[in-house]
Image (spheres, grey):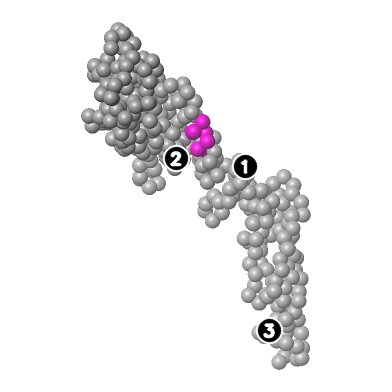
Amino acid sequence: MFCPECGSTDKEMVGDVCIDCFLKEFQMIEMPKNIEVEICSHCNSKFEEGKWIDEFIPEEEIIYRALERNIKIADEVSNEIINLEIDQIKGTIASCFVEVTGEVHGVQIDETHDVQVKIKKTVCPTCSKMQSGYYETVVQFRADKREIKPEEYTKADEIVERTLIKQSSSDKLAYCPQIAKLKEGYDYYIGSFKSGKKVAEALKEEFGGVIKESPRLISEDKSTGKGLYRIWISIRIPEFEIDDFIRYEDKIMQVKSISKNSLVGIDISTHKKHNIPMKNMEGIELVKKAEDVEIATIISKSPQFIQILDPIDYSTVDIDMKEEFADYNVGGEVKLIRIDNNIYLLS
């Protein structure tokens, strides 16, 4: 065939022209001479395709990815090898070049493109929220019918900090911009609702108690007309503590352990173990504190009774003998608790 460009009749034809004339105008890749990349000056996330993505990546990696994303390889190219290089970075401009080697209709060719990548520094919405002290959730740390102890506040602070550090790997808003120290308890302001829930669950894991959520309308999204809410999460830890005495379903028990979902108590009359769901906390009554336990002396012992000396008025008191008291010795000391005018020995 005849090439209308050069007149050749003995070369491979590509469409209407010979291979040589085709390759004179052919480009293996198309890409813009200037590329602009918008990145957050705080977290290095980049704005791409209408959203912020790829958080916490180095600036050079962002430039390389911008180059890769803007390369369009022609269909005729095969076995291509692309080399990306950053020649120099001056201020916000990165001078780069792209080298391409490939085959086009069996011919090996090389191609080089000079590209400038401009880095536009800005602040992503998430970092902007963090700078302004934005929060979605308030975790209210409270105790039921008692004051929270200083050591409990210290432990709660540690749990909140530890939980947020763990959450920060997947949630940029896992932070606490403010702690309000009120008379009734601490309010932890948490950046995101997701991390706020994790904080409340971690506090419940440590102290037990009941969690309640209360959404509050704060404004309206003008673009959608939907309400914008903040969530108050209340974690109310029990009035009772380990070794305290409680009444539940007509049983008086000494608390032996408290967990996220339940507590374990020992019936002080039968010495049997009971598991009480924490969701039933409203039905649990604190009757005596651990510090109300007294020490008495055993003065006699029989198969039917164990006799003690009352530490208050030094009168003798007979207590029914039980298997748990079999190893007690005369002259020894035993713990007791007074509840409803009754004396109970503790095993």
Q: Please name the residue that numbered disc 3 is placed on.
A: 14
What's under tag 3, amino acid-wise?
Val
Above or below for 209 versus 120: above
What's under tag 1, amino acid-wise?
Ser
Q: Is mark 3 on a helix, strand or loop?
A: strand
Report whether 141 appears left or right of 30: left
User: Which of the 4 image quarters holds residue 25?
Assistant: bottom right
* Mark 1 or mark 2: whose residue is earlier in sequence: 1
Tag shown at residue 41: 1
Above or below for 237 versus 17: above
Q: In which quarter of the image is the N terminus?
A: bottom right
Q: Residue lying farthest left?
A: 250
Above or below for 48 versus 303: below
* Mark 3 or mark 1: whose residue is earlier in sequence: 3
Q: How far apart are marks 3 and 1 (CA)?
A: 49 Å
Q: Which span of residues is magenta-colored?
A: 158-164
Q: Distance between the residues labelled 2 and 3?
A: 64 Å
- Residue shown at 64% from the left, 56% from the top: 66
- Residue shown at 31% from the left, 8% from the top: 314
Task: State whether residue 309 appears in this view.
Answer: yes
- Residue shown at 76% from the left, 51% from the top: 88
- Residue shown at 31% from the left, 20% from the top: 301
The mark lying in front, picked from 2 and 3, is 2
Q: Where is residue 297 in the image (x, y as percent from the top left)?
A: 36, 14
Task: State whether residue 288 appears in this view.
Answer: no
The mark lying in front, picked from 3 and 1, is 1
* Mark 2 or mark 3: whose residue is earlier in sequence: 3
